[in-house]
Image: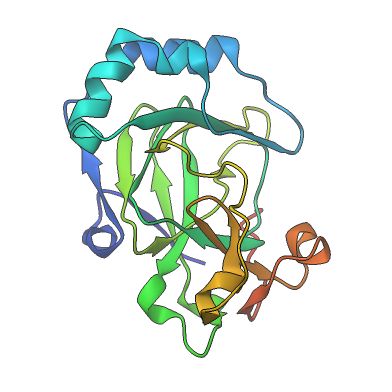
Amino acid sequence: MKIYSVYDPEFKNYGRVIEGAQVSEILKVLDKETPLPEGTVYVPDFEPITSLDEAKRLSLTLFGGVPAQFGFCNGHNTKLNCLEYHRCSEFNLGTEDFVLLIAMQQEIEDGFLDTAKVKAFHVPAGVLVEVYATTLHYAPCHCDAEKGFKVLVVLSKGTNEARPEFENVYEEDKYLTAANKWLLAHEESSEAKGGAVVGLKGVNIDIAG
């Protein structure tokens, strides 16, 4: 599939590049103090980053005073597997180049998203991007298998923590797998095998090669 750049006009409906952000200390901690597994690992709130003065100041710009959490998603991945969305924007920043596989929430029809709607966007190392709340996204993909990816994930405080306990009433409730996290899984994914609702139809995209 074609891989666009986040600097291409095609990205404007999905998110934007945050210019001029001071992120050198964040990148240093992300690079030196977080793991790089063969698979993927996600930590919602990583205190060594969240406690940085640089992160505290950046959170004011990104969330305007609403409490934010600075976590990370690291590892190796080339496949789509799932797509998720939140009721807030997500901000990403990588120590290495990475690729985002994304689509629009508005493209969900009758409870399913056709993976033919998914687009790929290359994010250069050190570039902070906002992924809008209406943009479906999931784990990053690496550009270099030897380097993998280490990607900052900034969200509203509490996102991706334990799913609140309640009886499903609305159709959308069935997709809620964690706090502020609605997930559509592909039938081939481990998430679907673990009980997540299958909401993706079509090819489980793999950008390897």
Percent position (x, y) of residue 177?
62, 58
Percent position (x, y) of residue 190?
79, 58
Q: In this rendering, does residue 150 appear at all?
A: no
- The residue furthest bottom is 110
The vertical placement of 188 against 106, above or below, is above
What residue appears at the point 51 percent right and 75 percent down from the top-left corner? 172
Location of residue 92 (image quadrant): top left
- The answer to which of 121 and 60 lies nearer the viewer is 60
What residue appears at the point 68 percent right and 38 percent down from the top-left corner? 76
What residue appears at the point 55 percent right and 71 percent down from the top-left corner? 173
Percent position (x, y) of residue 128?
31, 34
- The answer to which of 122 and 64 lies nearer the viewer is 64
Percent position (x, y) of residue 185?
66, 67
What residue appears at the point 48 percent right and 57 percent down from the top-left corner? 137
The vertical placement of 36 against 47, above or below, is below
- The answer to which of 175 and 105 lies nearer the viewer is 175
